[in-house]
Image (cartoon, helix red, strand yellow):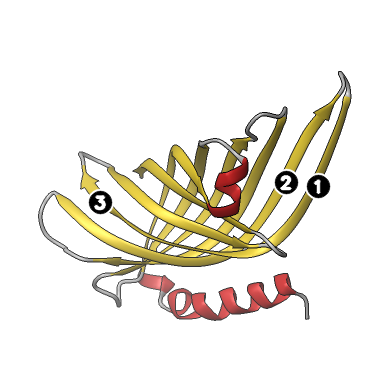
Amino acid sequence: MNRFSKFVTVAALMMTPAMVSAQSSAVGFGVSGGLSVPTGDLGDAVDAGYSIAGHVFLKPASTKNLRFRGDVSYTGFDYKNIDASYRSLGFVGNALLDLSSSGGVKPYVLGGVGAFNGKASTKIGSAAVVSTSSTDVGIQVGGGLNFQLSGFSTFLELKYVNVFTDGNSAGYIPITFGVRF
């Protein structure tokens, strides 16, 4: 069984309890974007970049402070001193634990596992583009603050993403602002 198949199996098993109680769950959607700071091996090679994401939130009625979130993210960086770029497309399942259920500002922590497709591309001459890509398993951990507004909520989030590639670490810290509907 390859690495991606193992990931899909583990993710499906992790989401089963949430799906069983989904009949009486609240579902929401959101978008976010912001700065992404590379770390480790990736930080040695690229400058700070950006991250954008779409989110699906699931709040089972049977849980008080536990929520689930699916993320589809796109993160981009430009290499230092050469005409090249690195992009990462991620699909992640997260568990979010709300630390407070009262007040206008609600802190939370999150953790998730997912699949990330990383692609490095460089332009040679005026026309040729050379690229390499791989899909690997990654994790993300972090936290944020929810702010409830009239009809929707916003959130500010900081997390650490680490993609386990062969031989190197592709780690980065997205600092994002989002809107949830």
The residue positioned 64% from the left and 78% from the top of the image is 9
Identify residue type, mark 2: Lys
The residue positioned 56% from the left and 51% from the top of the image is 72
Placement of the C terminus among the 4 image quadrants: top left
Task: State yes or no: discs 2 and 3 in contact (Cβ < 8 Å).
Answer: no
Pair 2/3: label in front:
2
What crowding class fits label 2: few (fewer than 14 Cα within 10 Å), some (14-19), or many (20 or more)?
some
Q: Earlier in the sequence, mark 2 or mark 3?
A: 2
Q: Earlier in the sequence, mark 1 or mark 2?
A: 2
The dot on residue 119 is 2
| Quarter of image, res 76 | top right
The answer to which of 124 and 101 lies nearer the viewer is 124
Rendered position, 167 above or below 15: above
The dot on residue 145 is 3
The residue positioned 21% from the left and 66% from the top of the image is 99
Pair 3/1: label in front:
1
Task: State yes or no: discs 1 and 2 in contact (Cβ < 8 Å).
Answer: yes
The answer to which of 90 and 133 lies nearer the viewer is 133
Q: Secondary structure at mark 2?
A: strand
The residue positioned 20% from the left and 39% from the top of the image is 150
**Going by the image, does 167 lie left or right of 16?**
right
Residue 111 placement (x, y as % from top left): 42, 67
Q: Secondary structure at mark 3?
A: strand
Identify residue type, mark 1: Thr
Placement of the N terminus among the 4 image quadrants: bottom right
| Quarter of image, res 162 | bottom right
Q: Secondary structure at mark 1?
A: strand
Residue 46 placement (x, y as % from top left): 60, 39
Using the numbered discs, state the Cα–Cα distance from disc 2 to disc 3 in whole angstroms: 31 Å
Q: Which residue is mark 1?
A: 132
